[in-house]
Image (cartoon, rainbow, N blue to C red):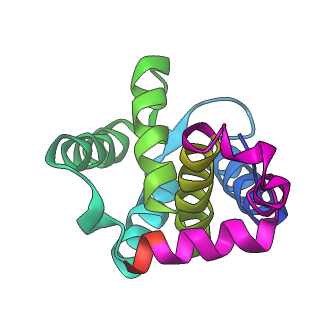
Amino acid sequence: MMQLSTGLSARRESIRSILNMIHADGQGLTYRSLLIAWRKGLRNGNWSRLCVPERAVMRCALWVARVKGSICNMRLMVQVLSVVLRLIRNRRGRIVDAGNRRAQAMLERYRNVFNWVPQLREWLRDPRYIAYLGLLEVNG
């Protein structure tokens, strides 16, 4: 799938922040790191975008981490980290993802059109046009 350079850097940044959340000695997710992600999700409005089961997983993880000190169970960590990724996601990431989805759908739908309009394929690979499509998708 096509990616913008800003989308890649945003993903790298979120991966770095998740790696920082996990203890250096591999002990798991701490209460403090989960609390930071939860607060960031509240501030940027992503908490309201989560569905009820995702909110429940995050609340449960916060409670377990507070009581036990950290979360070490790998299955629970995978579920919690998927929710944390959605919480710490920024607006630019949502725009790039929406633009990539729309450009991919257009590539599949207009496959036969590329023979007589080859510029369309170039447009659908241009990062600026993908960002434009993402803005249309998010704001429309």
Does 77 sit above or below residue 39? Answer: above
Total numbered circles: 0
- Quadrant assignment for the C terminus: bottom left
Query: Does the magenta portion include 1?
Result: no
* Residue drawn at the location 78% of the way across and 50% of the way down: 116
* Residue drawn at the location 54% of the way across and 41% of the way down: 109
* Residue drawn at the location 60% of the way across and 45% of the way down: 110
* Residue stretch rendered in magenta on the structure: 108-136
Which residue reaches farthest front?
116
Is residue 41 toward the left or the right of residue 21 in the image? left
Does 68 sit above or below residue 49? Answer: above
* Residue drawn at the location 47% of the way across and 30% of the way down: 77
In this view of the protein, which residue sits in the foreground, 69 or 73?
A: 73
In this view of the protein, which residue sits in the foreground, 94 or 44?
A: 94
Is residue 60 toward the left or the right of residue 43 in the image? left
Q: Where is residue 12 in the image (x, y as percent from the top left)?
A: 77, 53
Q: Where is residue 97 in the image (x, y as percent from the top left)?
A: 57, 56
Q: In which quarter of the image is residue 22?
A: top right
Which SS does the magenta portion mostly show? helix
Q: Position of residue 28 (x, y in %)?
A: 56, 33
Is residue 52 toward the left or the right of residue 137 in the image? left
Q: Quadrant of residue 23?
A: top right
Is residue 58 toward the left or the right of residue 102 in the image? left
Q: Position of residue 64 (x, y in %)?
A: 30, 38
